[in-house]
Image (cartoon, grey):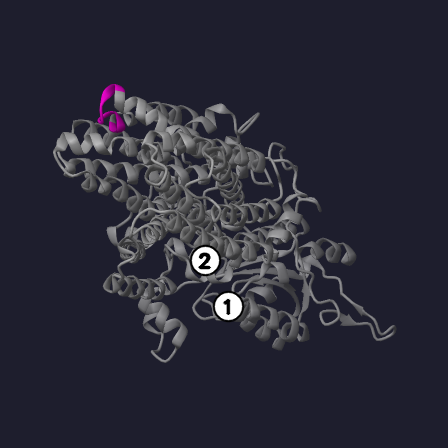
Amino acid sequence: MPSAGDTRTPERISEAGAPRGNPFGARFVAPLYLGASLNPVNSSIIATALVAIAAALHIPVGDTAILISSLYLTNALAQPAAGRLAEEFGPRRIFVAGITLVLVAGIVGSLAHSLTALIVARVLIGAGTSAGYPAAMLLIRRRAEQAGHAAPPREVLGGLSITGAATVAVGPAIGGLLIGWAGWRAAFWINIPVAAVALFLALAGIARDPDPVRFGSPRALASRIDLLGMLGFGGSLTALMIFLDALPRLDWPALAAALVLAAALAGWELRAAQPFLDVRLLVANGALTRTYLRNGLTLMGTYVILYGLTQWLEVARGLSAYQAGLMLMPMGVLTALAARVVSRRAAVRWPLIACAVLLLVGAVATLFVGSGTPIAAVICVTAVFGLTSGAGTVANQTVLYQEAPAAALGTASGLLRTFGYVGSIASAAITGTAFHRGVSDSGLHSIAWVLVAISALVLVMTVLDRQLARADRHHTNQPPAGARNPGPAPSTEPPRAEPPRTESRSADMTTGTHTTPALDPARTALLLMDFQPVVLGAVPDPQGVLARAGEALAWARAHGAHVVFVRVALAEKDAAAVPAHNKTFSQAVAAGYLTDGTAATAVHESLKAGEDDLTVRKTRISAFASDTDLRAELRARNVDTLVLAGLSTSGVVLTTLRQAADEDYRLFLLADATADPDPEVHRVLMEKVFPHQAEIISTADLAALSTAAA
């Protein structure tokens, strides 16, 4: 994932362009829903055409399985890549490009006369449809921010899931009718009218991306999108899928390749200035990582039944493929209904718990399914999994929207889908292992036991996830998604960690109590330090910290305090002067990610500098180690008080605070506008170290402190 504070943030929309009326009207959501349906359309309809394709091309039916696996593999690789490109070049551009690619693929597939040409068409379809979901999520997020919505637009997000579920539910039946009427090529040419309509609606209903396309040199572009990270991710995922596809045979070389490539990928991404897969964020943001795992495991459990039960119905119960497909239609319908119900709720924890419980209930019920079980009872079992799929997909999608950094939502959304695809491929491997000696009741029960273990793990993960409860308490207090946020208010602010009161207050010697001294804005400077893309991507919740820094800047503007922007960047002469024994900066010079003049080292665009503000470029960790004499500038402004906010806590904040304390400045540290890659280091410094030199406050305290001085 890219640095969360990158200048490619999707919500940078001018107020003049804010939507009027309902920002999520039909003109806006129709192309998103239609574009998102292209992937499930192509996933489901092809199943009914495989036999006809094999007959027309005079090849074994088994050879046509590559038309399914090629799409899944392309989707798994391309979804996060498409999200990253949407962040870089604009979600509308990538959305339109994806639909156009599907249109081209439909033409290629319709005219194909060989399996190779059909594989090419399917890969193009996979790449094109992969843009739909992550670009749609970015467009929705950008629209919500533009309209001032504080809460996630739950019904709009639910609509994406409902569209996909409904398409999967009716896809096989529609596919059977189309193939029977127009032949196997209908599975490809159906993309032409659908994509054409989606393209027209997108061009007419979705506003243009506000940022101009910025390519730069090939090397710079490759660095911005982290091309090597994408390739490493693709290689490791491909090797993993080869291993899973070979089960029950153990393909050790494929597994070894997957592990080696994954380790190399992690090492590379830890050094990348704008990582495609932000390893630090995944480690620091446990809620986001758990969402990926929970979604992948839930879909694995659902697809185990979808694949396994379908084969069992056809072989053990003697149903035709069409009859088996009809039996699964209630499952698809209930998936859509459950998604609709959950999308109307603000809370996500209880729907996710219910989802895990239903998954466990369905797994246990499958243990009692056999050749003599009535068909009606089998349909009821599949219905349980339909409810599970609908509730889980929407709730996990909402958690992703809430927890992922706004600027990285495209990549994050793509990764959510990738985990789902890995889960579906793993489920096929589980089914193949259980039925490798033949489809039987005992094989189905083996699948059920695996599913019991999966569902129990999902249930434990969900019940013990405290972040879900905290998120529910916060977001249930937000205004409805359709209401415009009038501005900061106690009920719409994210929860703030209260600063440690007893250690961070000055002692009143007459009463023995602790009080916070007031500050005089005219003699106060707000130092906003290292709020740059190159640094923002390394800390947890970068968007939240950035928002608090914006509030502090607004306070300074309103009260007449001085503002100092501090950024770290190395000019050519600065880089040449860094000695090899300086571990931090010698590595930065070697990697080139602190080069002055690049987007990564600019102050984040949401923090706009004014004419009277001071901007200093530092060449070491401390704000005083800058190309501007910061001490002289502060003295010239009669500043004796500093309010500090910055990234990271153990870097610029620690060194600047200690140096400023030695020079006898009065110091205030904004706890909620400061962060560190290591949350434990941040906690220790805030609670044990900084209170001895500074007052630890929050941005909410600033107005009261300046009022007291007046």
Mark 2 to mark 1 CA distance (whole Å)? 28 Å
Identify the residue position indicated by label 1 in the image.
Answer: 629
Foreground residue among 673 and 96: 96
- Label 1: element kind: loop
**Residue 229, percent from left and from top:** 32, 57
Which callout, 2 or 1, points at the residue further toward the start of the chain?
2
**Residue 159, percent from left and from top:** 50, 32
Foreground residue among 83 and 692: 83
Q: Quadrant of residue 506?
A: bottom right
Q: Quadrant of residue 671?
A: bottom right
Magenta residue check for 433: no
In the picture as drawn, the residue positioned furthest to the top comes out as: 181
From what the image shows, is residue 418 above or below residue 527?
A: above
Say the numbered circle drawn on residue 504: none
State the extent of the magenta-drawn residues as a range: 181-188
Which residue does the image show at 48% across and 65% down from the upper left? 628
**Quarter of the C terminus within the rendering:** bottom right
Circle 1 crowding by C-alpha within 10 Å: few under 14, some 14–19, many from 20: few
